[in-house]
Image (cartoon, helix red, strand yellow):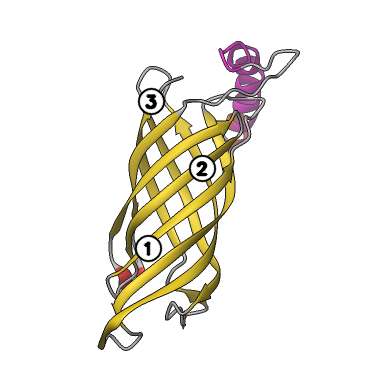
Amino acid sequence: MKTKLLLPLLGALSCLAAPALAQTDDTPSSRPGAVAPYRTSLGFRTTWGGPSGVNTELRLKHFIRPQSALELQVGQWHYQGAYQASLHYLWQPQLLTSSRLRPYAGLGIGAVGGTRDRFNEKQDMEVGAVLLGSVGIEYTFPRLPLAISLDYRFTAIGLNTNNFEYFGHSRMNTLGVGLKYTFGR
């Protein structure tokens, strides 16, 4: 009985709340013009899970166009203590419904180096090349110079990287959360 009353009540409430929610600052104008949410940001990204545990890396992002950015990523990579540096081209479109919440996708090239092989045995420093892809979503706070992001980075091609399969995916594929300090608007 209660559920029969609850469903129509929630439906009516959502119909009444829709006009009030539509009158926020993020309503689209008749001529949408994309604007970068900030000019440059500096922050970190933390990944977790699997045998790699928790890894942190530094990120520097700079918008070269209102919807395009270059991002430099430097940090530790997967469980063997390897290190990576990569440069990504990111396409970050502005949504019609919000200027602060923006999805992004991109490609990058990078170098991975380590002193241990896939069996965790010491070896001479070995450097490999990688082609990376990333997809994610970023939220920029309206009054604070901060942005948070959630993204998935995957390896498209890895040369000389000890990138062996682990339960159907590469150990270099990571899900991460980032926090950035933003400069300029």
Q: Is mark 2 on a helix, strand or loop?
A: strand
Pointer 2 or 3: first along the chain = 2
Q: Residue at x 54, y 38 (%)?
A: 69
| Range of residues picked out in magenta | 7-26
Spot occupied by residue 43 in the image (x, y as percentages of width and height): 33, 40
Q: Quadrant of residue 140?
A: top left
What count of labels does the image hold?
A: 3
Neighbours of disc 3 within 10 Å: few (<14), some (14-19), many (20+):
some
Q: Is mark 1 on a helix, strand or loop?
A: strand
Front-most of residues 70 and 97: 70
Which residue position holds label 3? 183
Q: What element carries label 3?
A: strand
Spot occupied by residue 54 in the image (x, y as percentages of width and height): 28, 61
Compared to residue 128, the image places residue 176 above or below, namely: above
Q: Quadrant of residue 114?
A: bottom left
Which residue position holds label 2? 70
Which residue position holds label 1? 84
Q: What residue type is labelled 3?
A: Phe
Spot occupied by residue 20 in the image (x, y as percentages of width and height): 59, 12
Pointer 1 or 2: first along the chain = 2
